[in-house]
Image (cartoon, coloured by chain):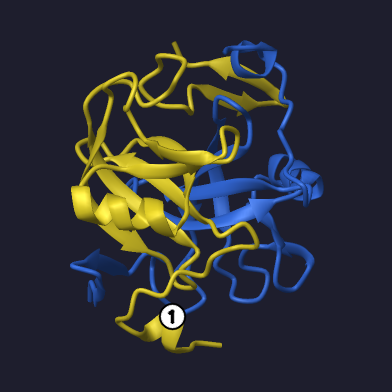
Chain colours: A yellow, B blue
Amino acid sequence: MTNERETGTRLDPKWDANGLITGVVTDAATGELLMVAHLNAEALALTQATGLAHFWSRIRWRLWKKGEESGNVLKVVELRIDCDQDALWISADAAGPACHTGARSCFYRIVENGVLLHDD
Amino acid sequence: MTNERETGTRLDPKWDANGLITGVVTDAATGELLMVAHLNAEALALTQATGLAHFWSRIRWRLWKKGEESGNVLKVVELRIDCDQDALWISADAAGPACHTGARSCFYRIVENGVLLHDD
């Protein structure tokens, strides 16, 4: 089941029906999962060119530089792509809270016995 | 922009048009990002009930217990959900390589200067 996309050295993202791949951001220092968002081709190109994480907002339907309003940019330390090239791992230095709620990470709630517990 | 889904204690996943949320799996011991896949309501329920990661395969169009064939199951250590409840963080003990290629992680290639470098 392997193929050139899985084994090769060519960046060949497998865009979904909306032209997007999944972006997973972790904190380069702590490894913590900070956020999950989506990238189109332009967001990926800008992320590579500028070294700052860019995404495509599925809600606002526009390109979005993370931190463009809050200042909490994500500086890329390393980019990795997965086997079938539909997910990008962005290891980053976070200038501030990654979540729009003000939390360090968007994953501030633990799922336990079917309910959510805040970790703070 | 906060609301009950973001601030509350009720698990209320924001399913996409295909009835899926994104699942991000990290190694509970090392923090390494292992894989990204998708869960429907049944996969989420089974993941919670059994303590083993289940997904919905968008290619095979069926429920899928990770490791059902390879034996490389993912034992859930902690589940977290993000602010808008469309992404689940599964921190897990991996019984073996998480990737179908045999790699420990699906993210075995670094994106650098537009090309992919294998990390092994």
Query: In the figure, is residue B42 to the left or right of B96?
Result: right
Q: Residue at x 68, y 56 (%)?
A: B55
Would you place residue B21 above or below residue B38 in this image? above
Judge by depth and name the residue closer to the eye, A8 or B91: A8
Q: Residue at x 44, y 20 (%)?
A: A100
Q: Which residue is mark 1?
A: A6
Q: Which quadrant of the figure has residue A49?
A: bottom left
Total marks in image: 1
Judge by depth and name the residue closer to the eye, B94 or B58: B58
Would you place residue A91 above or below residue A114 in this image? below
Q: Which quadrant of the figure has residue B84?
A: top right
Q: Which quadrant of the figure has residue A19?
A: bottom right
Q: Position of residue B17 (x, y in %)?
A: 77, 47
Would you place residue A44 above or below residue B98 in this image? above
Q: Badge 1 local density, few (<14 within 10 Å), some, or many (20+)? A: some
Query: In the figure, is residue B114 to the left or right of A39?
Result: left
Name the quadrant of the N terminus of chain A. bottom right
Q: Residue at x 29, y 81 (%)?
A: A9
Type of residue at label 1? Glu
Q: From where the camera sits, is residue B28 visible? A: no
Judge by depth and name the residue closer to the eye, B58 or B114: B114
Q: From where the camera sits, is residue B79 visible? A: yes
Query: In the figure, is residue B25 to the left or right of B44?
Result: left
Q: Residue at x 29, y 50 (%)?
A: A47
Name, please, the residue furthest toward the front. A62
In which chain is the residue bearing label 1? Answer: A
Q: Position of residue A31 (x, y in %)?
A: 29, 40
Name the quadrant of the C terminus of chain A. top left
Judge by depth and name the residue closer to the eye, B17 or A27: B17
Q: Position of residue A16 (x, y in %)?
A: 60, 63
Q: Position of residue B12 (x, y in %)?
A: 74, 26
Secondary structure category for the residue under label 1: helix
